[in-house]
Image (tube, rainbow, N blue to C red):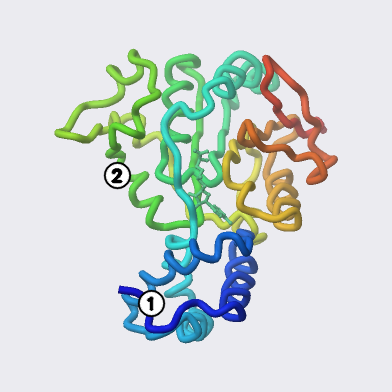
Amino acid sequence: MTPSAPLQEMTFRNLRDYIYDQTGIFVPDSKKYFLENRLSHRILEKKLSSFDEYLRFLRATENGELRNLYDAVTTNETYFFREPLQFDVFTSHILPRVLERNRSRGIKVWSAACSTGEEPYTIAAILKETAPGVQAKVFGSDISGAVLESARNGIYTSYAVRNIPSHYRKKYFRSRGDSFELDEGIRNSVKFLNVNLIDEKQVRAIRDVDVIFCRNVLIYFDDKSKRKAVSLMYDALAPDGFLLVGTSESLHNVTRALKPTVVDKVVIYRKAGS
Ligand SMILES: C[S@@+](CC[C@H](N)C(=O)[O-])C[C@H]1O[C@@H](n2cnc3c(N)ncnc32)[C@H](O)[C@@H]1O
């Protein structure tokens, strides 16, 4: 079933602007079908009759529907050990540099836009294996409450675990029918927060982070919202802190404050020290 009237051009633009203002996500004209499809479900669920009515409903309700909109319009693809070269550079290059500044302080890592948790859990498991005894704080955040709930549950499909090196898989996962349950120690070591990367108040509450992984989310933003999110993350970094974006992404034209370096073919961005 679909709403009784198709998504008109004008309503599409108004919905797109609304989503952009709230999330930084820019939906291009070529993805009108995507919005139509994702929002049809919300319209049916709320027993509304049209996209226009849905937009009015969104604007009228205080945040209640906004959370559902976030769940509906975000793309949450992720898996454990995604883009593994970056994790190699994290352990071989970044970790020693963070620890040499102040070993007793340990390391604080933020997986910004972590979706269902595979990224921060990968980082937590790697730290446990490669830096035992180091105090590690790992947290993940996302704009979507639904993915965070799933992250906290720690139950994964075979798709999510397919790239995990076998010793990690044996040590940290237990088969449960068709699913894989993550080790409780790793699960409890990661904290999850609801953070919208373009919300100043929310991001400014995060401070002194040594390493931010912000991978495969800025690709959905336009340059203006990329600049805003990156500048807020810059402020959240400790002096000498590092930012990693996805391997296909670049911060060229987005920031001059963070300096790119290439290590083993991986680009990492670093904040200057104090
Ligand atoms: C494709 S996933 C990336 C997951 C993981 N970082 C990875 O690379 O595998 C993108 C995530 O960004 C989140 N997202 C989109 N806009 C956001 C925003 N404004 N603030 C925080 N998270 C956002 C989505 O909810 C989604 O879970």
**Cα distance between the residues tagged 1 and 2:** 28 Å
Q: Is residue 213 left or right of residue 136?
A: right
- Quarter of the image for the N terminus: give it: bottom left
Camera-nearest residue between 38 and 253: 38
101 vs 45: above or below: above
At 57% from the left and 20% from the top, the residue drawn is 85
Q: Which residue is mark 2?
A: 153
Q: Earlier in the sequence, mark 1 or mark 2?
A: 1
- Quarter of the image for the C terminus: give it: top right
Amino acid on which disc 1 is placed: Ile
Say if disc 2 is inside 8 Å of ligand 1. no
Q: Looking at the image, which residue sits at the far left?
A: 177
How far across and how far down the image is residue 114, in percent?
49, 43
Camera-nearest residue between 116 and 124: 116
Amino acid on which disc 2 is placed: Asn
Q: Is residue 87 left or right of residue 68?
A: right
Q: How many neighbours does mark 2 have within 10 angstroms: few (below 14), some (14-19), or many (20 or more)?
A: some
Among the 4 quarters of the image, the one containing residue 187: top left
At 43% from the left and 60% from the top, the residue drawn is 71
| Labelled disc at residue 43 | 1
251 vs 46: above or below: above
Q: Is residue 127 left or right of residue 154?
A: right
Closer to the eye: label 1 or 2: 1
Mark 2 residue element: helix
Q: How many neighbours does mark 1 have within 10 angstroms: few (below 14), some (14-19), or many (20 or more)?
A: some
At 55% from the left and 66% from the top, the residue drawn is 32
Camera-nearest residue between 237 and 266: 266
How far across and how far down the image is residue 240, in percent?
75, 29
Q: Is residue 216 left or right of residue 166?
A: right
Mark 1 residue element: helix
Say if disc 1 is inside 8 Å of ligand 1. no
